Amino acid sequence: MKKNIFVSFLVVNCLVFFTAGALAQERGGTLIFGNLVVTPGLTLQEVYDDNIYLGSGTNSTTESEESDWITHIVPGLMLDYSLHERGGIKLGYIGDYAYYKDENNNDWKNHKGVFGLNYKAPVGLIIGIDNLYTRAQDPYGSDNEYRLGVPQTERWHNDLKTRIGYELQNLFRIFAYYNYYKQKYDEDIDYSQNYDCNEVGAGIEKKILPLMWGFLRYFHGETDYYTRREGVTDSNDADFSYDSVKMGLAWDPGAKIEGELNFGYTWKKYDNNADVSDRQYDDQNTWIASTLLSYKPTVTTTLGLAITKAMRDSGANTTEYFDDTGISINLKQVVLSKISLLVGAAYSTHDYEDSIGREDDNYTARLGIKYLINEWLMAGADYTYREKDSNYGEFDYKDNKFMVTLGLTY
């Protein structure tokens, strides 16, 4: 019965989007209502994964290397309301429904909602709001890799970033920031991952080139773990505060470079002296990075670069954390106008600061091809390789994924 419902769902959606695509060709490929642009989409993906639990046979999932076919249905809807030269408002949803062929008890679904507001008043006032809400069950874990490889790990998190500023004669900008981050897992099993974080900041930007700005920012934040279980209390949990200074370059829309070159330094101070097992918390100072750049030297070539450096805490009930340092490079090359070649590689190291001295090297490589059949229909194929090489063998894994994709956008 479940299979019949699934097949019917695919057939109906494909018919709807093929019909919509034909209409889109006649009307320019968009749904426009005055200042509002509506963009619905659907992606169908078939994946062969030779290690669905990311296991080596002895890791914490207690699963050996198992392979399976996974079907992904990814619906999406984006609403984009233009404020013309003053900015815009965006509201969107993207889902990911994963169905395993053999291990169907692992089926999971993710939901993401996005909201964005960017507004610039004639008098120089600047307002920005960005919010990302995620409700997830996938086995790929959070930033700290908690329960990595374990399907149906239910969690949600919300990231809110706001800013208000003022531009002076198109040469200087000053900003005040308020950010709020919240994460929530199952309290009975994963209580140690529940936290919220409040962050305030201030920044100044100076124009260096017509579309390039240099910036300096300061942030103060406080992270609070709020679930109390198994002896974890306010007096021994991993609550902490931090101060960060960041500097770098940013580009306005229209520049060949998009994103930010962003490096800095952070000072982290724990609220308590020891955890529930009487292990001592140690305050930390280190450099940080959150650089994400996209460079388009020609109309057919796009290069991507990401550099990260952050401290990842393991949870409320332990002093364990690791330094996460990584870099990734991606290339998109358009060939014959409708075919794009996608190549990427990434490396990161996780250096754990605990009694066992664990160190992980993480590698990722990707090779893909995308064919734009027309303005509303895309087909593609992709191969991704992932490997974790740890000095503790139970955390090692290798994973190969082969994917074929059909994407429709009205």
Image: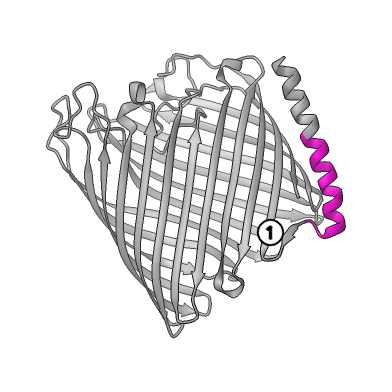
Badge 1 element? strand
Query: In x, y percent, where is residue 95?
Result: 60, 38
Residue under pointer 1: 37
Query: In x, y percent, where is residue 346?
Result: 51, 43
- State the residue in front, 288 or 329: 288
Q: Is residue 43 above or below residue 108?
A: below
**Is 326 in the magenta?**
no
Q: Residue at x 45, y 79 (%)?
A: 124
Query: In x, y percent, where is residue 174?
Result: 36, 74
**Is 24 in the magenta?**
yes
Please indicate whether residue 86 sits to the left or right of residue 25 in the image: left
Provide the major secondary structure of the magenta segment.
helix
Q: Which residues are magenta?
A: 13-29
Q: Residue at x 20, y 27 (%)?
A: 232
- The answer to which quarter of the image holds residue 244 is bottom left
- The answer to which quarter of the image holds residue 147 is top left
Q: Amino acid at mark 1?
A: Val
Q: Residue at x 22, y 40 (%)?
A: 239
